Image: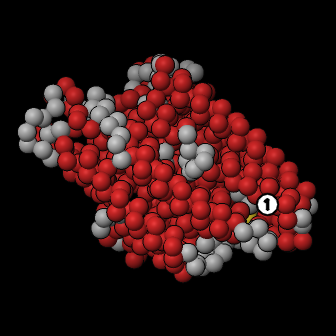
Amino acid sequence: MNQNLTALIPELALAGASVIGLLAGSWLPRRRQWLVAVLAATACATGLAATAVTMARGREQTVFSGTFAVDTATDAGRLTVLGALLLVIVMSVETVDGHKRATEYWVLLLLAGAGTLALTGANDVLTLFAAYLLASIPTYALTAFAKDAPGTEAALKYYLMGALLGTAMLAGIALLYAAGRGTLYRDLHANLPAAPYGLVAVGLIAVLAGLLFKAGAVPAHFWLPDVTEGAPAPVAAYATTVPKIGALIAGYRLLHQALADTDVNWPLLLAILAAVTMTLGNLAAFFQTSVTRLLAYSAISQVGYLLMALAVATRTDLAQKSLLFYLAAYAATNLGAFAVVTELPHARTLDDYRGLARRHPALAAALLICLLGLVGTPPTGIFLGKLEIFSAAVDGGYTWLAALAVANTVASLFYYLRWLAPVFTTTAPAPAHAQSVLGRWAAAGAYTAAGVSLALGVAGGAVLPFATGSLLP
């Protein structure tokens, strides 16, 4: 049994920093709580460095009786999650600075990030569920961090839906265990093809229900608009971005490694869910006037595009690299848009952004890059990600799904332009107080994220090879 703890340095760095931060925060005066934020950023940097070393050495392995895999998907997920977590930390500085519960904020963020990292490498259904819980429970608390009415309501809805679908997921794991006589993916892969069809189908649907909840996909998407509107902006940025990375990589690994040879037609199920999710997200975003709710429905539509890779997980070699690259590009682009929202805390509606380009041209430029990036406009990273994932869908036999995705992409331009049009208007600008800025850290996060989005689009040819490689059994 391989018990190599050095293979889990990124996960251990976040978990260890959360424990140390909680203990240190109990003794630090309020004016020194920022040291816990520095500790959190250091843990993320340590995880990034360890992942870079692992990728350079090519040390793919499974650890702890094969329950956790360290391979291409895990490493790519680590880089994306830890990079996104760093951006969330940066954009949270002014929001949390001086708060009496600042330490708890940073610790909860680290714990949720550790759970997401565990999702990316889970190679056993019990490990998958433990990671689901660790990624979920701290996020419920973060949603209600402000302790106001909207945040409390959002946290309650988030928790109740998570508890319901988490219970369904656990029941599904029990059914898969009964059908496959094991919890490791390799055991399920060997035994599920001969198991009763109904048992496998119901078990898979129940497990997918939990993962779809984490990703914010239809029909488990109802919590997302309330959370983005009720939670602090950096928490909304986290909730709409980071859990998706873990959930979608975990779903891809489960389908590819455990259910590839079953008779259940899960590719068609995922294709239908992808089609419904992208369409509903776009239609619901059309006439939103709240910027946070618009970004929430945008996030739902983006999950629809990402689910296309899961639908063709076993049908084409393009699926894995398109999924991993799109996730990285989406994380940077979506966080950039939320960083602008964080920097302008009083600009809650589209009209509040009227004339932003005149008052804050750099912020307007970052918002332009991120919103057009979410559409999939070149040369941003999502453009290349969509190109790859549409190609994977066609190569996997779902040309109709790719055509629908193209139509949805064109349609999405409407509501992003509804936001951008007031930004660059020269008449009747919004009142100055509506566009008062929060500070320098959130702005730095916006500029960094926009730059990364562009860099991934320009240098995508050099980045894509790092997303190729087989998953470990």
Q: Residue at x 63, y 71 (%)?
A: 313
Q: Which residue is mark 1?
A: 201
Q: Residue at x 66, y 63 (%)?
A: 269
Q: Residue at x 55, y 47 (%)?
A: 216
Q: Quadrant of the N terminus?
A: bottom right
**Which quadrant would residue 263 be assigned to in this image?**
bottom right
Position in image of residue 257 (x %, y %): 73, 69
Which one is in front, 265 or 2? 265
Amino acid under disc 1: Ala
Which one is in front, 350 or 272? 272
Q: Residue furthest left?
A: 427
Q: The residue tagged with tag 1: helix, strand or loop?
A: helix
Q: Residue at x 70, y 66 (%)?
A: 266
Left or right: residue 304 versus residue 95 is right
Q: Is residue 110 visible in the rendered structure shown here?
A: no
Q: Residues within 10 Å of mark 1 (few under 14, many from 20)?
A: some
**Which quadrant would residue 17 be assigned to in this image?**
top right
Left or right: residue 110 versus residue 391 is right
Position in image of residue 404 (x %, y %): 46, 67
Position in image of residue 244 (x %, y %): 55, 51
